[in-house]
Image (tube, grey):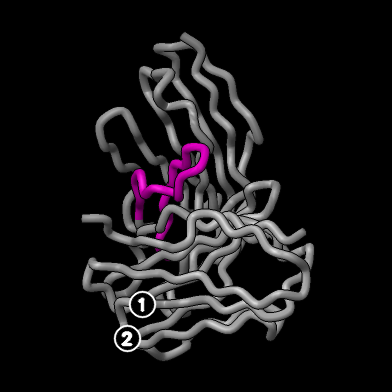
Amino acid sequence: QQQVKQSPQSLIVQKGGISIINCAYENTAFDYFPWYQQFPGKGPALLIAIRPDVSEKKEGRFTISFNKSAKQFSLHIMDSQPGDSATYFCAASESSSGSRLTFGEGTQLTVNP
Amino acid sequence: DTAVSQTPKYLVTQMGNDKSIKCEQNLGHDTMYWYKQDSKKFLKIMFSYNNKELIINETVPNRFSPKSPDKAHLNLHINSLELGDSAVYFCASGGSGGNEQFFGPGTRLTVL
């Protein structure tokens, strides 16, 4: 049972464009929703995270939009740069169950110069 | 000043062997995790320890055994390695509540 579904699987964006990655979850007990960025040969790095009491969080060029009723959240990368080319993972966790992260399948983002 | 470190970075071994992966964190966190990333890059929790106590044990073959000598270290022992164990294994640590998790650089295990 895939509890966090992520789309698209791959995304190609031109430099300066907006990259949008979407995730949907099933478990309404999830209370923490992070996004991770992973470069080849490296570990996932925490990019930005949100809790369900807010609908949006922005950090620099990265914004999370959260829709609790639809059980969906998305990552928006504004002014995408070639250096943003990486695999992005959404995740969710439930504080009461040891905070294990349940990950989406990942999105391979390529930003063309 | 590495936050979460793992050794070795690469591990190539024969089927049937026993191997260990070590993890250390200097963030002062109470909770540590092991995740497995398969060939399709899918990440899945394996184990979690809080203050040296096992709190999460997903459906993982009992050939895999985590050991936590202290709260800064969480090692992973794998017995009787199989071809299907080939993957990248990530250690992570989390602070109070464990929500913010920081990952190590990973260990790429290849079983021949």
Rendered position, A19 above or below A88 = above
The picture quadrant where one finds residue B51 is bottom left
Query: Residue drawn 49% across and 64% down?
Result: A101
Residues rendered magenta in the picture: A31-50
Rendered position, A68 above or below A6 = below
Counting labels gives 2
**Does residue A97 appear left or right of residue A7 in this picture?**
left
Decide whether residue B91 is among the magenta residues.
no
The picture quadrant where one finds residue B95 is bottom left
Q: Chain of mark 2?
A: B
Q: Amino acid at mark 1?
A: His
Rendered position, A85 above or below A35 = above
**Does residue B42 appear left or right of residue B71 in this picture?**
right
Q: Amino acid at mark 2?
A: Asp
**Main SS type for the magenta part?**
strand
Residue B59 in sight from this viewpoint: no
In the rendered image, which quarter contains the C terminus of chain B?
A: bottom right
Decide whether residue A41 is among the magenta residues.
yes
Q: Position of residue A30 (x, y in %)?
A: 48, 66
Residue at the bottom extreme of this rendering: B53
Q: Position of residue A66 (x, y in %)?
A: 43, 46
Query: Residue drawn 52% across and 38% down?
Result: A40
Disc 1 crowd rating (10 Å Cα; few below 14, some 14-19, many 20+) is many
Question: Label 1, on which residue?
Answer: B73
Q: Chain of mark 1?
A: B
Question: Label 2, on which residue?
Answer: B70
Q: Are marks 2 and 1 in contact (CB under 8 Å)?
A: yes
Residue at the top extreme of this rendering: A113
**Does residue B54 appear left or right of residue A9 in this picture?**
left
- Per the image, label 1 sits on a secondary structure element best described as strand
